[in-house]
Image (spheres, grey):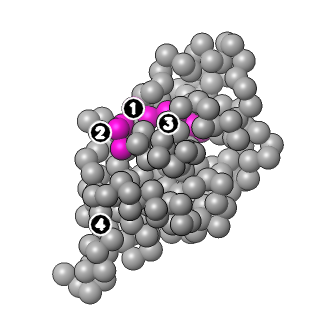
């Protein structure tokens, strides 16, 4: 194990308190989701979002997913949903479906990318739920890997790819899904990525 591996291992934690503190301090956190490790930060903290995009080597144009504990946490990001959209989305949450919803014009392009929609999910993964509940706001969610590399499915894989650059890796179990979340367009109901 090289010295850089040693430093990365020191960032592994099983403490939800440490993860919450890290995000509140403007940090970038790796955490388990339904199928892979996610990379996240406070979406209101734009310097953290910028840093996350740089770590992942991801273009801001693509946009990011937000995870929330409940629909109320999305109020700063999406306008109230009309009845038809809500009837389509509501039965799938909490769950592994990410929906593209209309986005408020005030949301930074760092979060929404080059889009007039925002990808959001109310996850049923207990760690994601607890993180968002304790933070009181959504969490950015993108796979914890360098763009173009396979998504990490263990804390050690995250440490090997990104360990020197991120603030903390929350070492807790993934959910039992085999693939990242399905992505659907809330207006058209089109499936953009199969789960």
Find the residue positioned furthest to the right. 105
The label number, if any, that marks residue 12 in the structure image: 4
The label number, if any, that marks residue 69 in the structure image: 3
- Which element type, helix, strand or loop, lies under badge 3? loop
How far apart are the alpha carbons under marks 1 and 4?
23 Å
* Residue 125 within the segment the image draws in magenta: yes
Tag 4 near tag 2, CB within 8 Å: no
How far apart are the alpha carbons under marks 3 and 4?
24 Å
Q: Earlier in the sequence, mark 1 or mark 4?
A: 4
Tell me where residue 5 appears, x and y as whole percent: 27, 78
Q: Is residue 8 left or right of residue 28?
A: left
Q: Earlier in the sequence, mark 1 or mark 3?
A: 3
Tag 1 near tag 3, CB within 8 Å: no
Q: Which residue is mark 2?
A: 175
Q: Earlier in the sequence, mark 4 or mark 2?
A: 4
How far apart are the alpha carbons under marks 2 and 3?
16 Å
Find the residue positioned furthest to the left. 1
- Which element type, helix, strand or loop, lies under badge 1? loop
Q: Is residue 28 visible?
A: no
Residue in the image at 70% along x and 41% along y: 76
Quadrant in the picture for residue 155: bottom left
Q: Which numbered disc, 2 or 3, marks the residue closer to the eye?
A: 3
Q: Quadrant of the C terminus?
A: top left
Q: Which residues are magenta?
A: 119-127
Q: Which residue is mark 1?
A: 124
């Amino acid at each position: 194990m090289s010295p850089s591996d040693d430093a990365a291992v020191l960032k592994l934690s099983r403490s939800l308190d440490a993860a919450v503190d890290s995000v509140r301090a403007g940090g970038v956190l790796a955490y388990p989701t339904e199928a892979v490790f996610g990379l996240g930060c406070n979406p209101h903290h734009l310097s953290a979002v910028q840093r996350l995009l740089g770590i992942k080597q991801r273009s801001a144009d693509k946009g990011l997913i937000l995870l929330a504990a409940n629909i109320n946490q999305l109020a700063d990001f999406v306008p109230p949903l009309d009845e038809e959209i809500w009837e389509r989305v509501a039965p799938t949450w909490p769950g592994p479906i990410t929906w593209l919803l209309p986005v408020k014009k005030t949301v930074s392009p760092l979060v929404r990318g080059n889009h007039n929609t925002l990808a959001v999910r109310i996850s049923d993964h207990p760690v994601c739920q607890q993180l968002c509940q304790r933070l009181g706001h959504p969490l950015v969610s993108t796979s914890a890997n360098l763009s173009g590399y396979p998504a990490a499915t263990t804390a050690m894989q995250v440490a090997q790819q990104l360990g020197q650059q991120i603030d903390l890796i929350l070492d807790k179990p993934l959910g039992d899904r085999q693939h990242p979340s399905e992505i659907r367009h809330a207006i058209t109901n089109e499936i953009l990525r199969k789960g």
